Amino acid sequence: RRAGLLPAVPGARPAPAPHDPRPHLPEAARHRLAQLLADRAAPTASGRRGAAPDLTELIPQWLATANRRGFRAPADLVPPLLDAARARTDLRPQALAFAGPLGLWLAALNPEWRFALRGGAGGSLVPDTGDPEAVGRLWEEGLFAERVALLDAVRMRDPAAALALLTTTWSTERAEDRLMFLDSLRNGLGAEDEEFLEQALADRSRNVRATAAELLSALPASAFAGRMAARATSCVNPDRTGAGASIAVEAPHECDAGMQRDGVVAVPPTGRGERSWWLGQLVEATPLGVWRERFGGRPAAEIVALPVADDWAGELHAAWCRAAVRQRHPEWARALLGEPSAPPAGTPGPTSIAERSKLLAVLSEAERADWVAAFIAAHGLSEAFQLLGVCTVPWTGPLGRAVVDALDIARDGGSYPWSFSGVMGLAERCLDPAEADRLEVLTATPDEQEGASPGAGGYWSEAFQRLVSTLRLRAAMEAELT
């Protein structure tokens, strides 16, 4: 009373968190996670990172391994884990999966962690998808993340049942929720989804309409794909007027109501011409198999190598690139990428590294790694950062050796070591830890060469020491989670 405060009326205790049946972490792994989450090492006064591993950059890999092994998060480390995920969006899918039902339970009680309730489905434990009553109850009453997880689980087991579940509440869902639910249909996409997706083309949300159109274009036998193919083939045809084979292009002169209903955006971005904008969207949504038939049975590599009239090659090839990525078509992706040793300007497909990265993601893991290794061997590391980002971790032996050899060549050439800091950071996370012993020889400080950057040898030595230390730490982390 003297302090001027009265005791608050106690509220009801929350219901206990749901049970998590996953096994506990080994004690060594638990200590390692606590160390990773607590690391707040600041850079030195000189700005140099030093030879010590950057622990915070190893959190994603640790979480991925722990999730793959099926462990659950220690209860006392879930709050700092959610704090880390709040600060770094790239951690959220793996962090929420590892935090499990306790993470969602805590997020419902702390406004600072509310992102977990909408940020992903990884932490949700779904009921037995064979129990219609439990599925229906969770679909009607669950949190958004739980409903996404449920839809994904049902979709994996029975695509038709998942579609039926989605249709029961589709008209009452919010636009952003409809978009996320629609994305779940990518798994098991088939002809039975066509009617629903056709209806979604008339959705009031532009993003939902665009996603429905994208999914329909991945169904080559759909009515949508047929409509887009008819429009595209009226614009792109073999040119039979000249002596040799070539491609003639006549871009659309208008974007009619039918095109707009099928997802073609009428107004182009600033700096783009209307006709080229419309043409690109039509070709992008056309099944790539149409072009083999249109060009006399030629394979993709021959079609993309044909000359294109009136400077339409860039627009046409860019649209084919987007179609290959959307339709996950390895033959076309391979043809548009061209030979890795060829200079970008000399390839039939995209010249930008960003487009090449997307095409690479369509190929198998082994082919992707081999292509990037050959690219690095021919062109060095100056443009390889994005390409390396789509390669599977850990890098294959040939790819890892190509990266290390290129770094060694750059060091011997007297290059600025900080110019390769991004690739070096990737190498720390992506090289096979078994390479550590082989790299030991690169940790020595090389002799200063004439014309080299002052002090570059010391920086390179420090960077390779950090690389070796990080690889050995990753090996230890892997062993602790076994």
Image: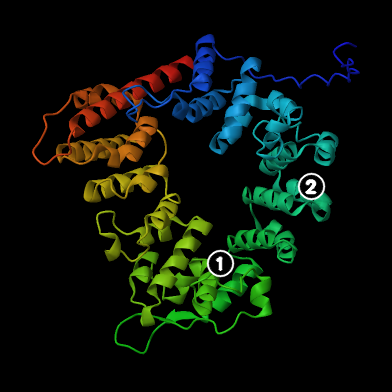
Residue 286, quarter of picture? bottom right
Q: Is residue 24 above or below residue 116?
A: above
At a point 61% along the width and 70% down the height, the residue shown is 265
Q: Secondary structure at mark 2?
A: helix
**If you read the primary sequence from the N terminus, does the residue marked by circle 1 or circle 2 appear first?**
2
Q: CA distance from mark 1 to mark 2?
A: 28 Å
At a point 24% along the width and 51% down the height, the residue shown is 379
At a point 71% along the width and 34% down the height, the residue shown is 114
Q: Position of residue 412 (x, y in %)?
A: 15, 37
Label 1: few (<14), some (14–19) or many (≥20) C-alpha neighbours in 10 Å: many
Q: Position of residue 478 (x, y in %)?
A: 44, 20
Q: Position of residue 471 (x, y in %)?
A: 35, 24
Q: Say which residue label 1 marks.
A: 285
Residue 472, quarter of picture? top left
Label 2: few (<14), some (14–19) or many (≥20) C-alpha neighbours in 10 Å: some
Q: Quadrant of the N terminus?
A: top right
Q: Is residue 280 left or right of residue 212?
A: left
At a point 50% along the width and 63% down the height, the residue shown is 323
Q: Is residue 329 left or right of residue 460?
A: right
Q: Is residue 399 visible?
A: no
Q: Say which residue label 2 marks.
A: 165
In the current view of this chain or complex, which residue is farthest to the front? 2
Q: Nearer the viewer, residue 58 or 45?
A: 45
Q: Secondary structure at mark 1?
A: loop
Q: Nearer the viewer, residue 307 or 219?
A: 307
Tell whether label 2 touches label 1 (CB within 8 Å).
no
Q: Is residue 397 left or right of residue 443?
A: right
At label 2, the amino acid type is Leu
